[in-house]
């Protein structure tokens, strides 16, 4: 139940978040000043917080989608299995997010 | 024709046309194909964004203006937009029940996805062709 809502919520977040990607590309196409402005916006603490959340939403929605592929093939639908998948989904998305940010942002 | 009390039988009966009779199956299939493509391309997206985060324009062009990277990014964007349009259609069908608001929401959804796609693809074309 909660995971179904979370799948939708992360879907909506990603829906709006596509704007972030497109604004970045458009700024690069327009010119140096526009790109510098967007980089400044995304680079400050609030922008980084949003991008961190975006990364988590992306991984959570992706793992949720893979869960749906399993269900489409009648795998993991029994009580107990469903709850286990939900935890794998939640923990997996947090681990993947921390992994990407640790390797590429905080250390790299 | 729609019955007054909706039961599982109503939904299972094709004649009631419950949901979108023309598009529901196509949406189901397309949502899964686009989702699968997105899973394959998510690594590329993360790599690209991480590689170019905070990069200046010259550096960004050196990566994005490569036609292969540009095309993959454009495909990724369009496939994601198709996926999110269908996702939002499902949410609207579930929660926006007033017929007029429903039609308006569906239209705004399509316009948003089209607009985002156009801006993204034009920006990429500009970067690939003119730098």
Image (spheres, rainbow, N blue to C red):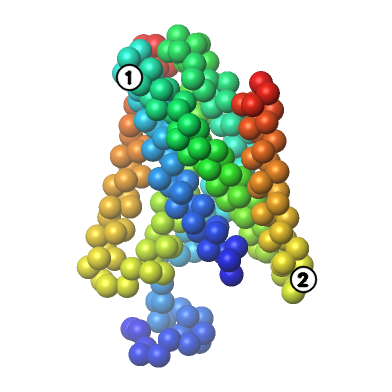
A65 versus A103 height, above or below: below
Mark number displayed over residue A34: 1
Mark 1 surroundings within 10 Å by alpha-carbon count, few (fewer than 14), some (14 through 19), many (20 or more): some
Q: Identify the element where label 1 is drawn.
A: helix
Do the residues bearing badges 1 and 2 touch, measured as CB atoms within 8 Å?
A: no
Residue at figure coordinates x 40%, y 45% from the top left: A16
B14 versus B81 height, above or below: below
Task: Depth check: give the residue in front, B30 or A29.
Answer: A29
Q: Quadrant of residue A71?
A: bottom right
Give residue A74's position: percent from left, percent from top.
Answer: 72, 67
Q: Is residue B58 visible?
A: yes
Q: Quadrant of the C terminus of chain A?
A: top right
Residue at figure coordinates x 70%, y 51% from the top left: A91
Give residue A90's position: percent from left, percent from top.
Answer: 66, 54
Label 1 vs 2, first from the N-terminus: 1
Residue at figure coordinates x 51%, y 52% from the top left: A10
Q: Position of B54 compared to B16: left or right?
A: right
Give residue B49's position: percent from left, percent from top.
Answer: 54, 27
Q: Label 2 marks which chain's residue?
A: A
Q: Residue furthest front?
A: A45
Q: Is residue B79 visible?
A: no
């Amino acid at each position: 139940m909660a995971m179904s809502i979370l799948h939708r919520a992360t879907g909506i977040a990603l829906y709006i978040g596509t704007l972030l990607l497109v604004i970045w590309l458009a700024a690069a196409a327009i010119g140096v000043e526009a790109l510098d402005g967007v980089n400044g916006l995304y680079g400050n603490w609030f922008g980084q917080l949003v991008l961190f959340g975006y990364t988590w939403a992306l991984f959570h929605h992706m793992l949720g989608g893979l869960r749906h592929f399993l269900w489409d093939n009648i795998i993991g639908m029994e009580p107990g299995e469903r709850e286990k998948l939900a935890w794998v989904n939640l923990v997996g998305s947090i681990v993947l997010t921390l992994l990407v940010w640790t390797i590429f942002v905080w250390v790299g | 024709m729609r019955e007054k009390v909706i039961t599982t039988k109503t939904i299972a009966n094709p004649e009631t046309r419950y949901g979108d009779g023309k598009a529901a199956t196509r949406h189901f299939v397309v949502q899964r194909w686009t989702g699968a493509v997105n899973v394959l391309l998510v690594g590329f997206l993360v790599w690209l964004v991480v590689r170019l985060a905070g990069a200046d324009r010259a550096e960004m062009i050196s990566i994005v203006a490569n036609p292969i990277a540009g095309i993959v990014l454009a495909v990724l964007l369009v496939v994601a937009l198709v996926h999110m349009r269908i996702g939002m259609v499902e949410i609207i069908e579930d929660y926006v029940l007033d017929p007029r608001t429903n039609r308006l929401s569906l239209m705004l959804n399509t316009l948003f996805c089209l607009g985002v796609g156009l801006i993204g693809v034009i920006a990429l074309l500009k970067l690939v062709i003119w730098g």
